[in-house]
Image (cartoon, helix red, strand yellow):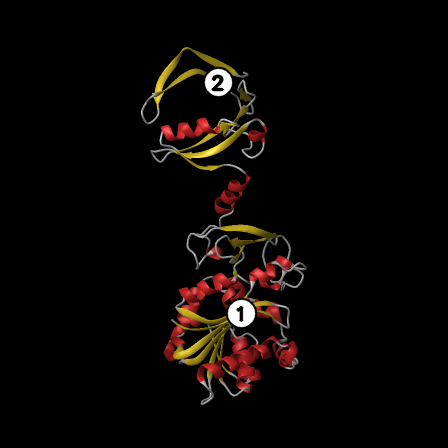
Amino acid sequence: MGVKIQKIDPPRKFSVGLKRDIEISDCAHIYLNSNEQVTFKTDDGAEHDVCRKEWGFYATGSVNGRLPAHGLKAGLVKGHAERYCIMLVEEGKEKGFNEYLDHDQNRLVCWLDDENLQRISMTFDTQVNESNDNAFNPFVMGATYHQVHHATQKPERETAFDLSGAYSRHIYKCSMTGHFLNQHDYDLDALYEQGYVDATYGAKLKTTFEKIINLPSDQSDNKKRVARIIEFAARHFGNEKAKSVLDVGSGLCVFPYEMKQAGWQAMALDLDERQAQHARDVAGVEAQHGMLECFSQKDLGTYDVITFNKVLEHIKDPVKTLAYAKQFLKDDGFAYVELPDGEMAAKDQKEGYDREEFFIDHHHVFSMTSYAMLAQKAGFHIVTLERIREPSDKYTLAGFLVKA
């Protein structure tokens, strides 16, 4: 059966509008099978297609393509009773359209043109699902993200973790703050508990540690980090006493070792028991293993300085962890936090989103704005915050924080 047209003669008439002063004539019913189409035309040359599909109706042609090419533009309209509809306006007849809106107390929300469609797409079509733990946004609840990169293979320098299935992850960027999220289906918590150290260092904890501590000062991220902290501490505390530091996520323990060499009392904290044992046996630094949130102030004590050196980006809820750390910080102390600088890394013309800052083990990649929001929401004031290009080529945000 083809198109079936059932004329209504005489037409069924009814009144619509806020004042019920607009009379509509219902002239015909048109029945279409799947993939059949009818085209409505005006004497002025505008035309509009409606196509029946198995699942419903393709109600318009592309609103930023076919419709404008045939003399129409689509507008999203909000009615006085909080009802929304899409209206198609003939080119050159905008004045009559506006008069109609005024008459019936309707409002044009926006034209569905390229500019507004892009904004709508960023807001809805590619919005990160806030119910997905991996996409948790601790900075601006309700902020919207749009996809900026889809990685279907491991970047050359990324560690080859034991991941199940085909490699796939999406990088999203917050339209409000410039913050980046890595979204994928891999269980990184299990990875940290089981295979992160093996995949990253294998049996080379000691040799990697020795290689890094023997780097010249101008080639060492850690030596420059130590120098920054000691210089800031001298201004903050003065030089009248030895200082204590808790390094959260100490890894190879290079940084606590360097601080101890500089005369500080250092405590290393790491999730992996082997790295904590390495800290004690090889680096000669006191160490604990486990999540920071598993310890109380009674367990760890308090410190003049707490450091997070490229740690919080690995945590789903960095605000929670940073806020929890305040109890281990003396009231006159400070925190030092380093985070990957996504804004600068994304602009890198050579690697861009394949850079280390965006590697799969980073839930978050920060902007200056999201760094500041992280600090504020965790209960800290920023004293200084700067961008650094490290000897290792990393783009880094480095800041000193005090309790709010």
Disc marking residue 272: none
Q: Mark number for residue 30?
A: 2
10 Å crowding of disc 1: few (<14), some (14-19), many (20+): few
Q: Residue shown at 58%/83% (left/top)?
A: 282
For the point 51% across and 69% down, the residue is 311
Residue 162 visible (yes or no): no
Per the image, the residue denoted by label 1 is 386
Work out whether residue 75 can be spotted.
yes
Q: Is residue 168 above or below residue 18?
A: below
Amino acid type of the residue that numbered disc 1 sits on in the rendered structure: Glu
Q: Quadrant of residue 194?
A: bottom right
Between label 1 and label 2, give the one nearer the viewer: 1
Residue 205: percent from left, percent from top: 61, 76
- At horizontal 63% and vertical 74% (from top left) the residue drawn is 203
Amino acid type at image mark 2 = Ile
Position of 47 relative to 145 (above/below): above
User: Does residue 143 lie above or below 249 as drawn?
Assistant: above
The Cα–Cα distance between marks 1 and 2, rounded to whole angstroms, is 66 Å
Q: Residue furthest left?
A: 19
For mark 1, give the secondary structure. Answer: strand
- Neighbor class of circle 2 (other Cα within 10 Å; few <14, some 14-19, many 20+) is few
Q: Is residue 223 left or right of residue 333?
A: right
Q: In the image shown, does 17 or 331 lie closer to the viewer?
A: 17
